[in-house]
Amino acid sequence: MKKLLSITLLLLTTQAIYAQDLSKVSWMLGKWKSVNAKTGNTSYENWTRISDQEWSGKGFRLSRTGTDTLFSEKMTILVKDNNLYYVADVKENAAPVYFKFTAINEQGFTCENPQHDFPKKISYLLEGKKLKATISGDGKEFSYYFDR
């Protein structure tokens, strides 16, 4: 019984730590918009808090006219198996892809999955009032800047 109680307390403590970590980047909750100056396409990311251990996000890119969806992605940040993950779910992949958090602070976070084809690394950073999302791997890197 004592062992079960100890394990339960450890799991609750771990989840509380991840909740504190996520609160460091609560600035990213809400709606973000980015306009590509070259193409005129507009990208959006919307983040909501489901619970202290789970956030839900939706990303999509619209054509210059706003009538065609060029890309869409469902994103989740969650605690699983005592780790914090960024989960990307896009139609190009048969199953959601898990990126394990490797760093988090008040300015942002980095997640990695070295086994994924691309990206292998995802970073979100707050730069002034802008959200900078960067995907990278195998010598390639793309950054996207979002405003509220």
Image: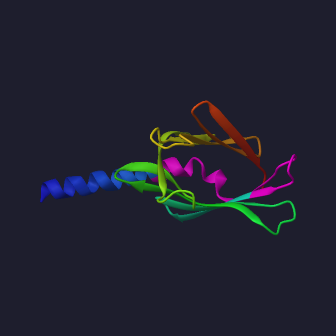
Residue lying at the far top in this picture: please name it. 139
Count the marks: 0
Q: Is residue 32 visible?
A: no
**Quarter-of-image position of residue 139:** top right
Q: State left or right for residue 113 relative to residue 40.
A: left
Q: What is the x, y in percent for residue 48?
A: 61, 64
Check the image and tell me how it is coloured: rainbow
Q: What is the x, y in percent for residue 84?
A: 44, 49
Q: What is the x, y in percent for residue 70?
A: 73, 60
Q: Is residue 22 visible?
A: yes
In the image, residue 11 lies in the stretch drawn in magenta: no
* Residue range (magenta): 19-43
User: From the image, which quarter does the C terminus lie in?
Assistant: bottom right
Q: Is residue 19 above or below residue 113?
A: below
Q: State left or right for residue 29 relative to residue 4.
A: right
Q: Is residue 127 above or below residue 75?
A: above
Q: Is residue 139 above or below residue 28?
A: above
Q: What is the x, y in percent for residue 68?
A: 78, 67
User: From the image, which quarter does the N terminus lie in?
Assistant: bottom left
Q: Residue at x 46, y 38 (%)?
A: 114
Of 135 and 2, the residue lying toward us: 135
Q: Is residue 121 above or below residue 80?
A: above
Residue lying at the far left in this picture: please name it. 1
Q: Residue at x 35, y 50 (%)?
A: 82
Q: State left or right for residue 103 relative to residue 35.
A: left
Q: Residue at x 82, y 69 (%)?
A: 67
